[in-house]
Amino acid sequence: MKLNIPIEETIKKRVSTRTYDSKNLSKNDKEKLMNEISQLTNPFGENVRIHLIEKDTLSNGEKLGTYGVIKGANTFLGVTVDKSEFGLIAAGYQFENLVLIATDMGLATVWLAATFSRAQFEKAMDIQKDELFPAISPIGYATAKKSITESLMRKTMKSDKRKSWDEIFFESSFENPLSRKAANEYASPLEMIRVAPSATNAQPWRVVKKQGAYHFFETHKSNASEDEKMIKKVDLGIALSHFHQTALEHGLAGYFEKWEDIGIAIPDHTNYIISWNIEEK
């Protein structure tokens, strides 16, 4: 389902915000946000759940730690999903859709996958042990001035820099970069992948165009832990949100499907995730 917002414009406008005004969400903003949350879906058939908590409504004195990374935030969103092949992909997709909706509303957010106290948030959000709980985000109003911590983090992670087109997108094989011209009407959806946020700005997505489809892959370092690999699946979900929503905005027909045989030699430390078939079913 296409979001009822200007997709490309909103993707370009979204920034990661770590310094917040301490006031709570307005009644109107909270009501609109809760209504939007109730209508969110994903194209993978997964039951993704969004949680919202406010610090001043916690009844039993739970603390919500973000290791000093977040300043001033009082309201947080969390995402959980059942354990399944596409669970983390769907969580990334659906939570990023919510981030884009929040951006269009003028609200600030930032994905947090590692820099928060998981046990504290699990307790506050009443998350069950059998649920995957990959990420949270503060949500609120950005301050005009960034904290010193935020400024240092953006510089360290090179938050405003992205990999070049020919490092990410390929045609027929990983040996042959895809040109923007060859991407044709899919140049914009692919560009919106390129500028997507990811944990530590790693940009772990790779895309190969072949046989009437775009095939999506996740890549990671050889020494990546299982937790890091899980987070990269969430990142792929974010990328798929950008790609799919932009394709819908441009009126491009297609559908997601996992292929049995994509006929592509896959490099080490790279996993095939799913394909976007350009033709209609």
Image (cartoon, rainbow, N blue to C red):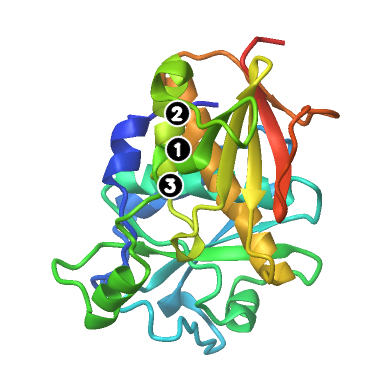
* SS assignment at label 3: loop
Give the amino acid type for the residue marked by disc 2 in the picture.
Answer: Pro
Q: CA distance from mark 2 to mark 3?
A: 11 Å
Q: Mark 3 or mark 2, which is nearer the start of the sequence? A: 2
Q: Position of residue 278 (x, y in %)?
A: 61, 15
**Residue, far top:** 280
Q: Which residue corresponds to the image point at 58% horizontal and 35% vertical from the top-left?
A: 207
Q: Mark 1 or mark 3, which is nearer the start of the sequence? A: 1
Q: Position of residue 125 (x, y in %)?
A: 60, 71
* SS assignment at label 1: helix
* SS assignment at label 2: helix
| Residue annotated with mark 1 | 166
- Callout 1: 10 Å neighbours few (<14), some, many (20+)? few
Give the amino acid type for the residue marked by disc 3 in the picture.
Answer: Ala
Q: Quadrant of the C terminus?
A: top right
- Callout 2: 10 Å neighbours few (<14), some, many (20+)? many
The quarter of the picture where residue 25 lies is bottom left
**Residue, far left:** 144
Vertical order, 208 against 28 (above or below): above
| Residue annotated with mark 2 | 189
Q: Quadrant of the N terminus?
A: top right
Give the amino acid type for the residue marked by disc 1 in the picture.
Answer: Asp
| Residue annotated with mark 3 | 196
Q: CA distance from mark 3 to mark 1?
A: 16 Å
Residue 202 in sight in this render: yes
